[in-house]
Amino acid sequence: MKRTMLHLIMVSSFLAAGCVPETENIDIVHDEGKPVMGLDYRDFDRAASELIQSMLGSGALKKQGGGRYVVATGRIVNDTMQRIDTDQLMAKIETGLLNSGQAVMTSAVGAGADKLVHESRELRDAEEFDPNTVPERRTLIAPELSISGKIFQKNVRYGRNRQQVEYYFQLKLSDVKSGLRYWQDEVIVGKRGSNRSVAW
Amino acid sequence: MKTITNILLFIMAVVITGCFEQHDSRIHLREEVRSDSLVDNIVIRPVVHAFSALIGEGIEITQALTRRNDAGFLELHVNGYNRSYQTKRFRYRVEWLDEDGLLIESKTSVWLPASAMGKSPFSLKVVAPTPKAVNFRMDTRKWE
């Protein structure tokens, strides 16, 4: 009897182990997976692609007299119910701008600031460092343009058992000196699904 | 009498068909918006739709134009027509090639959604990620 019980336990544990879905790597380039109610990397890819194309196509980054604009990343507000690192969007946008050859991003100020840029300037009086290798005063380049934006979410009831979730990706490009806005655009990602699906 | 009736019917058919055709070709009046005609009415429409679905009508690309915009980026303008009576949703992805025919890696080369309403023209515009792009290749896939 005891042996039979042991066999049963063994067989059922094998079966249970077989039922666990296998882990698989996602094909990031040609992902044919089902959409989800929340924002996934495909939504960010799409929003970034459409926004970069819109910005480049507008001609807002074409500098009079040639050269490249110095662009700083401003504040990107996450007004969704999800915990989003806005860098998920901005890293793609910044890469797109850098690769376009029409802009350079600054790490001196803004949301994309690198602390080390300023820390390295505090080493001017440090005896351990060769003064010739420490950045001089007035060497930082101020940004000419700033990108800022917002991601927000709106949930709408769509029938008794369904809901509609709308995500808005808004970006704007402004001239830092004059405050004039050169470009802005919005990408909407809409999803409909069960009320039971959680969009946060 | 019979001949007169036939002539009257023929004239009516010509008039109705003629009225149906007379509008600006830039303005597309859809079924159930425009007036019914001999070839498009509540009786014939389901048969035509079923036949279209049976022979598998879908998207057709009529033109792919490229031009360099003022900022120096290559723009691709794709014009097409949805031959089906259903709205066709699909995804497209454009990859850009440099003057050596090599692929330019880009954050913008992702699958993007598009849709075209039944029996309607549609257009897509894609901007190259860098002025180095001189050519393109485009792929499509079904909307999952």
Image (cartoon, coloured by chain):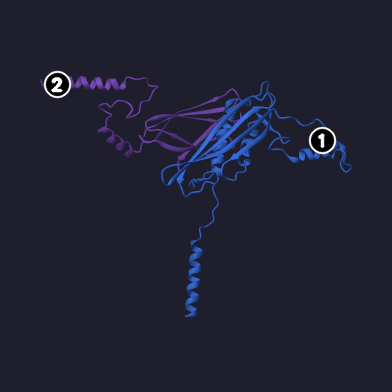
Chain colours: A blue, B purple
Name the residue that disc number 2 marks: B5
Describe the element under mark 2 as helix, strand or loop.
helix
| Mark identifier at residue A135 | 1
- In this view of the protein, which residue sits in the foreground, B28 or B108? B28
- Say if A57 sits above or below A159 in the image: above
Q: Is residue B107 left or right of B16 when viewed as pictured?
A: right
- Say if A66 sits above or below B43 in the image: above
Extreme residue toward the bottom, this view: A1
Q: Residue at x 43, y 37 (%)?
A: B89
Same chain? Circles 1 and 2: no
| Residue A55 on image: x %, y % | 59, 29
Extreme residue toward the right, this view: A127
- In this view of the protein, which residue sits in the foreground, A84 or B22? A84
Q: Residue at x 76, y 41 (%)?
A: A116
Q: In which quadrant of the rendered image does the C terminus of chain B lie?
A: top left
Residue count near mark 2 (Cα–Cα under 10 Å), binned few <14, some 14–19, many ≥20: few
| Residue A170 on image: x %, y % | 57, 34
- In this view of the protein, which residue sits in the foreground, A198 or A173? A198
Report the chain holding disc 1.
Answer: A
